[in-house]
Image (cartoon, rainbow, N blue to C red):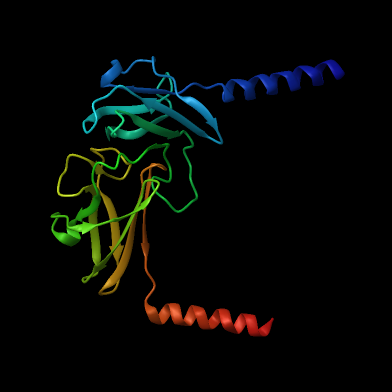
């Protein structure tokens, strides 16, 4: 029995070790989609890699993070990543395929990137005639956030994009040629917050509560404190 138990423990340990040792690569046009650029396991489900020696202000186009057999990869459509002032592209890969953090994509692996700082981001979609102009505020660390009032209830496709240009855009899987994102409103003049987390490889839309609703929430909180 002891021998069998030891064999079972050893098998489990080997399986866990193999899973932990799963290598991931940055693959794209720059390396003929090969396996030369191995990502670093940074722990906690995060893998990182820096492409260096590039021309500042240009792009590293058509790349993904993936394992050898393409069983896990991100983004679904290819990424086009701006090169920063140091001639680098810093990538962050999260191979987890199911998320419950309220961000999208929620059922796919995510590829994040360090914000190059080369340009600002905006919302272009059906709510503004795909003309852009709704600029997001740069909060640092790759997080860009903005609010839009949508006058008429309905379903609106949109994308995050480089201000004034389609050279860089973020769709539903965060790839540059991904399908549109979507937000659906139910009453006139709803205010929606649009959040783009470049480093996390994710995006989010959230309904902003009306002032009256916030006041009621505050009153409810005060009532709970008084009861305690």
Q: Residue 86's spot in the image, x, y percent?
A: 31, 30
What x and y, as percent, mark residue 28? Answer: 30, 22
Would residue 97 appear left or right of 178 to someone viewing this image? right
Q: How many marks?
A: 0
In the figure, is residue 165 to the left or right of 13? left
Q: Nearer the viewer, residue 205 or 153?
A: 205
Q: Nearer the viewer, residue 18 or 221?
A: 221
Using the image, determine if residue 191 lies above or below residue 40.
below
Q: Is residue 64 above or below residue 172?
A: above
| Residue 57, image quadrant | top left
Q: Position of residue 46 (x, y in %)?
A: 50, 34
Residue 46 in view (yes/no): yes
**Looking at the image, which residue is at 59% across and 84% down?**
223
- For this orientation, the residue located farthest to the right is 1
Residue 118 appears left or right of 220: left
Quadrant hosting residue 200: top left
Query: Quarter of the image containing the N terminus?
Result: top right
Residue sitting at x 69%, y 81%: 228
Residue drawn at the location 56% of the way across and 36% of the way down = 44
User: Please, which residue is most extreme toward the front here?
Assistant: 86
Q: What residue is drawn where x is 63% and y is 22%?
A: 17
Residue 1 in view, yes or no: no
Q: Position of residue 160 (x, y in %)?
A: 26, 49
């Amino acid at each position: 029995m002891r021998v069998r138990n030891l064999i079972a423990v050893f098998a489990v340990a080997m399986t866990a070790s193999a899973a932990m040792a799963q290598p991931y690569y940055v693959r794209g046009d720059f390396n003929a989609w090969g396996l030369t650029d191995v990502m670093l396991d940074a722990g906690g489900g995060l893998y990182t890699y820096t492409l260096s020696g590039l021309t500042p202000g240009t792009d590293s186009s058509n790349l993904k993070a993936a394992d050898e057999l393409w069983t896990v990869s991100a983004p679904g459509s290819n990424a086009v990543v701006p090169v920063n002032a140091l001639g680098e592209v810093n990538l962050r890969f999260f191979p987890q395929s199911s998320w419950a953090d309220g961000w999208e994509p929620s059922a796919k692996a995510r590829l994040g990137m360090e914000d190059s700082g080369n340009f600002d981001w905006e919302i272009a979609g059906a709510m503004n005639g795909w003309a852009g102009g709704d600029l997001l505020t740069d909060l640092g660390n790759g997080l860009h956030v903005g609010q839009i009032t949508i006058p008429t209830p309905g379903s609106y496709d949109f994308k995050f994009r480089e201000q004034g240009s389609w050279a860089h855009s973020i769709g539903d899987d965060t790839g540059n040629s991904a399908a549109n994102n979507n937000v659906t409103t139910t009453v006139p003049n709803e205010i929606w917050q649009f959040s783009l987390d470049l480093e996390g490889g994710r995006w989010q839309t959230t309904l902003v509560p009306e002032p009256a609703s916030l006041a009621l929430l505050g009153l409810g909180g005060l009532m709970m404190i008084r009861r305690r």
